[in-house]
Image: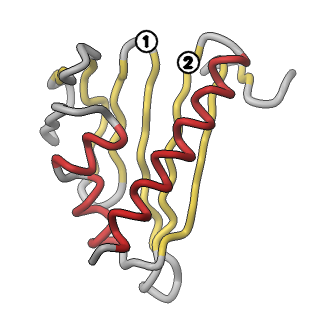
Amino acid sequence: MPTGLTQDAGWQIGVSRTLPHATPIVWDFVSSPEGLALWLGPGAALTSERGTSYRTTEGVTGEVRGYHCGKKIRVTHGTTTVQVALTPAADGARTMLRFHQEHLASAEERERQRAHWQRVMDQVATALGRG
């Protein structure tokens, strides 16, 4: 099977980076309106209640599939599923941030989304660096 193709979730991509910030700082940002705009889309607002829907100003719709405060958010995003997850480093001063997207249409879309998530990660790192 080609890299990035799974039997259950189709084409998928994941991007991760360890950031030099404690988990609560990273969580507060990625779950804030500014953070959500970066990774989910402008205008997206989420609640922690499973099954609630959202809509971005660009017209992408989805629903919350899982929301574990301080750890991860999983949502549908159009025809795909996106998850953002945080794992604290052993020292407590750093956090691994992961973006994962599954049910992509093709290998080409997987590569486009890899570039997208790398840009999003750069933007999150830059935004957190302001503090």
* Left or right, residue 41 beside residue 45: right
Q: Secondary structure at mark 1?
A: loop
Task: Check disc 2 and report the residue beneath it.
Answer: 103
Give the residue drawn at x 43%, y 39%: 83
Residues at marks 1 and 2 touching, judged by CB atoms closer than 8 Å:
yes
Q: Is residue 48 above or below residue 11?
A: below
Q: Amino acid at mark 1?
A: Thr
Question: Residue 1's spot in the image, x, y percent?
Answer: 87, 21
* Quarter assignment of residue 14: top right
Give the residue drawn at x 51%, y 52%: 98
Given residues 49 and 78, the one toward you in this image is: 78
Q: Amino acid at mark 2?
A: His
Question: Residue 38's spot in the image, x, y percent?
Answer: 33, 43
Residue at mark 1 to residue at mark 2: CA–CA distance:
7 Å
Name the mark on residue 79.
Answer: 1
Other-residue count near label 1 (Cα within 10 Å), few / some / many at <14 / 14–19 / ≥20: few
Q: Secondary structure at mark 2?
A: strand
